[in-house]
């Protein structure tokens, strides 16, 4: 477990800089210096405190969470997000439109049917699953709530205001539509897989905690990478529109 006590906080401290670095790579934006310096200082502080305080302290959850969660949010919101925010603010304000005609959620036929069928089958199978009754009911309840939430949230995502105009408004609208379709598909599959996984977690038995931690981390990482890509794509569309208007 030593690797977890030391590796998990270190990884959480690195993640904000890694995410912002990926965003800058995708967009061509510069300005990583402050984020990298802050990350190096945080890592040095964590390593020094772990050495000075020793295993009796760094193995405790309060110490691990203080550096992992506290450090993560300080680095993300204090040094990472300002890079993205400043890049957007440097672009000219773009007119945005909300479609008067409701946009369709572009998914395949039965996309909101088969997950509930799969959930029902999994829930019935929990009668024979190991573990306490409350754990089985909790997993099934959380899975159902997540699928219902997905059904409600996706249509709202499709109605978000989008930049419009420029010398090629139809081309921009088509690129926005493709971006919206990709974003919707990713969110759909991520949430369906996550909630079906939560529903059937008790089937994992004693290893469920470990598999759940690994599975949850992988889903969280996938969601984070998707968020970075989506923000980068949104920025590039705004930049494309601003460049086209300046040239017009």
Image: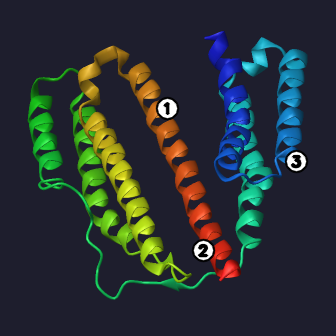
Q: What quarter of the picture does the C terminus occupy? A: bottom right
Residue 186, given in percent of the width and then of the height, sits at 37, 48
Q: Give the x, y percent position of residue 120.
A: 11, 42
User: Which residue bears the numbered disc 1?
Assistant: 217
**Front residue of 45 and 178:** 178
Q: Which residue is mark 2?
A: 241
Label 3 neighbour load within 10 Å: few <14, some 14-19, many 20+: few
Q: Is residue 163 above or below residue 74?
A: below
According to the picture, the residue beneath numbered tag 3 turns out to be 34
Provide the secondary structure element on which disc 2 rests: helix
Does label 1 or label 2 sit earlier along the sequence? Answer: 1
Residue at 66% x, 11% y: name it.
2
Secondary structure type for disc 3: helix
Q: Secondary structure at mark 1?
A: helix
Instruction: Tell me, yes or no, if residue 208 can be seen here.
Output: yes
Q: Earlier in the sequence, mark 2 or mark 3?
A: 3
Q: Is residue 131 visible?
A: no
């Amino acid at each position: 477990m030593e690797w977890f006590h030391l590796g998990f906080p270190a990884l959480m401290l690195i993640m904000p800089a890694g995410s912002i670095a990926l965003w800058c790579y995708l967009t061509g934006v510069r300005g990583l210096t402050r984020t990298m310096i802050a990350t190096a200082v945080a890592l040095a502080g964590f390593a020094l405190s772990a050495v000075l305080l020793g295993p009796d302290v760094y193995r405790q959850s309060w110490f691990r969470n203080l550096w992992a969660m506290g450090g993560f949010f300080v680095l993300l919101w204090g040094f990472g997000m300002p890079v993205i925010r400043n890049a957007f603010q440097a672009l000219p304000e773009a007119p945005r439109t909300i479609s008067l005609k409701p946009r369709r959620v572009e998914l395949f036929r039965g996309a909101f049917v088969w997950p509930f069928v799969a959930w029902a089958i999994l829930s019935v199978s929990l009668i024979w699953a190991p573990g306490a009754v409350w754990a089985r009911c909790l997993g099934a309840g959380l899975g159902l709530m997540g699928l219902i939430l997905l059904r409600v949230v996706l249509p709202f995502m499709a109605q978000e205001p989008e930049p419009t105009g420029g010398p090629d408004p139809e081309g921009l609208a088509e690129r926005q539509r493709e971006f919206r379709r990709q974003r919707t598909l990713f969110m759909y599959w991520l949430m369906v897989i996550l909630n079906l996984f939560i529903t059937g977690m008790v089937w994992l038995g004693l290893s469920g905690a470990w598999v759940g931690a690994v599975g949850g981390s992988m889903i969280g990482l996938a969601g984070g990478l998707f968020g970075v890509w989506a923000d980068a794509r949104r920025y590039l569309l705004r930049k494309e529109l601003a460049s086209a208007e300046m040239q017009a």
